Image: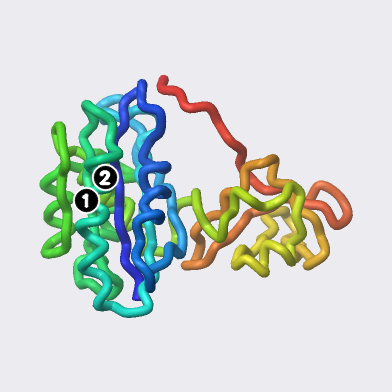
Amino acid sequence: MRVYIGFDDTDILDSEFGTGKVARRYERLLPAGCQVWGVVRQQLLVDPRIPYTSHNSSACVVVELADPSLAPCLLPLAIEHLERSSAQGSDPGLCFVCEGDQSLAALITFGRFCTEKIMTQTDARQAAGGSHLSGHGGTNDGIIGAAAAVGLTASGWNGRFIEFANLRDFSDPLSVGKLADNGIRAVSLDRDAICPAPDDLVTTKGWLRPRLWGHEVVLPVMPTGPGRWESMGEKRKKDKP
């Protein structure tokens, strides 16, 4: 069984780290029988009327459980972790939903709306229904991003992985076959849609961040020469307009 845990710590400009690292570090607390499938960053609407630090993003940790009875113990761990890790003056929120929960359909719709227009805490609570959604400081506006992170990730069609199969430890370049061995599918975005071969090499520019497409882990690539590819996207500086 999978559990979706949405984090939004709405960090402040002077924070040493943001929501992404808070979500990734949750893995350290997991008990035996639980493992993180992936951590997915979700981009929400950027609008001057919305208070955000740099890019208005939230993150969802997807945990796989060998025994569904382990799920209840993950929630207090997540709450404690968020409260301990959130920056002073931030407005953290947490959403916790198990696979198959009836609220996921509404959260998926809510998540999509959060990429298009301004949503409220009331909207988030209505979408969450009976599933867990809680604020942990400040205005509690983080519940909006946390709920959106769960919905968008559960949809299987949004976000980029900031953690999956120790992606930060991969070499650059690396082969298409090596990516596949670790559960990452290289997909060509060029006009002719050539299929990358297992021995082809992919340059990641030191920033391997596959996408969540069709409930799969997908790395979009473009050809740069015979048997050579380059992944789409690159690291950007944290700033706010």
Point out residue 65 in the picture as x, y percentages from the top left corner: 36, 73
Label 1 Cα neighbours within 10 Å, binned few <14 / some 14-19 / many ≥20: some
Q: Residue at x 52, y 66 (%)?
A: 216
Looking at this view, is 239 or 170 the one in front? 170
Point out residue 185 in the picture as x, y percentages from the top left corner: 63, 64
Above or below 155: residue 20: above
Q: What is the distance, in whole Å, between disc 2 and disc 1 at their CAs?
A: 5 Å
Above or below 3: residue 25: above
Tag 2 near tag 1, CB within 8 Å: yes
Point out residue 54 in the picture as x, y percentages from the top left corner: 39, 28
Above or below 5: residue 146: above
Label 1 residue SS = helix
| Residue 107 visible in the shown view | yes
Label 2 Cα neighbours within 10 Å, binned few <14 / some 14-19 / many ≥20: many
User: Which image quadrant for residue 77?
Assistant: bottom left
| Residue 112 visible in the shown view | no
Q: Which mark is residue 241?
A: none
Protein image colouring: rainbow
Find disc 1 in the rendering and name its residue: 79
Looking at this view, is 213 or 37 the one in front? 37
Q: Quadrant of the C terminus?
A: top left
Find disc 2 in the rendering and name its residue: 82
Q: Residue at x 53, y 27 (%)?
A: 237
Label 2 residue SS = helix
Which amino acid, by three-letter code, is at mark 2?
Answer: Leu
User: Which image quadrant for residue 87?
Assistant: top left
Q: Residue at x 34, y 76 (%)?
A: 1
Which amino acid, by three-letter code, is at mark 1?
Answer: Ile
